Amino acid sequence: MEPKPSFYSSGDVLDYLLNLKRIDRKDGLLVTWYHAANSKNDMEEALKADVMALESDVTLEGYNTPNETEKPIMAHPPVIYSDNTLQDWLTAVLRLSDKVIKLDFKNIKTVGPSLDILLETSSKLNIDRPVWLNADILKGPNVRLILQLIFLTLIQEKFPNCTLSPGWTTLYLSHFPNKTYTQSMVEEMHSLVENLPQQITFPVRAVMVKPAWTHLSWLLSQSRRYSLTLWQGKTDPVTVEDLLFIRNNSKPEQIYYDLYEPIFNIYIPGIK
């Protein structure tokens, strides 16, 4: 068995997967994902699966209840208890796989304790693969909720060796299908991150990307460090035509497709 190439937590996902010979070119579409690898059972299934990246959700045990603790656990609200802590999850993923790590923080109180665990873990185990840290930090289409911008500050202070994944809160409403990201939204985001040192991938709701393409392509043009990660709500009507439009108007290394698998079961010439 060949030794794994050495890598680092702030490294580029596509470079990492090229080094492992998991992909043959720098193309975000080739990266495969496992969603919500949270419980021990789901994590074990994810570790066995033929995927390249694990996306998992982090919250505090008992969040927003009298039983709340400072222990980060792997769960997606409204679930606030889990048989898997962030510490146990990281240890298993780092020891048993070479999969890329993406942690999605579900509330701002979880970020500080989680970054402390990441830092402590990095002193004991070599985090030899890219780590993406994700949170919604700005108001997006159809919502009022805003997470505090301390997310960016905490990462710079505690665990800067990562790829940042700062997004907008969104709500998709089928009766307002054209309500989407605006130029002011992307300019606000760019102003927050343009002077940060990390690579940055902006998570964007796939069903909203095509009508906002003028604004999102402007954002991509502002830095070579920027990419988009398309994500999909379970009932979002993402179409192959939408994906082809995005594909044809961007560079392969600029877009990641963190989508549900059925949309890619359709053969698209030149992609699969």
Image: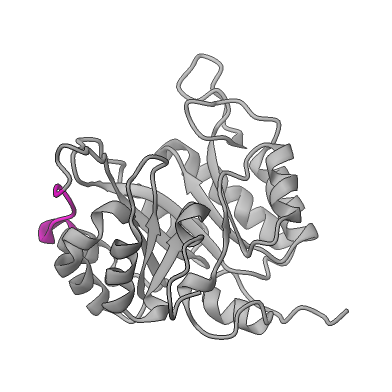
Q: Is residue 190 magenta?
A: no
- State the colouring used for the structure image: one colour
Image spot of residue 213 (x, y percent): 19, 66
116 sits left or right of 91 in the view: left
Instruction: Tell me, yes or no, whether the highlighted magenta stretch contains residue 179.
Output: yes
Quarter holding residue 72: top right
Q: Which of 163 and 246 lies nearest the eye of the viewer?
A: 246
Q: Return the residue nearer the eye: 242 or 79.
A: 242
Residue at 53 percent of width and 51 percent of height: 103
205 up-or-down from 83: above or below: below
Which SS does the magenta portion mostly show? loop
- Side of 3 where 195 appears, left or right: left
**Depth check: 224 or 65 in front?**
224
Q: Quadrant of residue 249?
A: bottom left
Q: Position of residue 19 (x, y in %)?
A: 65, 83
Q: Residue at x 47, y 44 (%)?
A: 105
- x, y percent for residue 229: 39, 62
Which of the image's four quarters has the N terminus? Answer: bottom right
Residue 136 visible in the picture: yes
Task: List the single residue furthest toward the top.
Answer: 66
The residue lying toward the viewer, choosing from 104 and 271, is 271
Q: Residue at x 51, y 60 (%)?
A: 265
Tally the marks. 0
- Please state the horizontal and vertical placement of residue 271, each as a whole percent of the image: 45, 76
Q: Which residues are magenta?
A: 178-185
Q: Is residue 102 left or right of residue 216?
A: right
Residue 11 visible in the current orientation = no
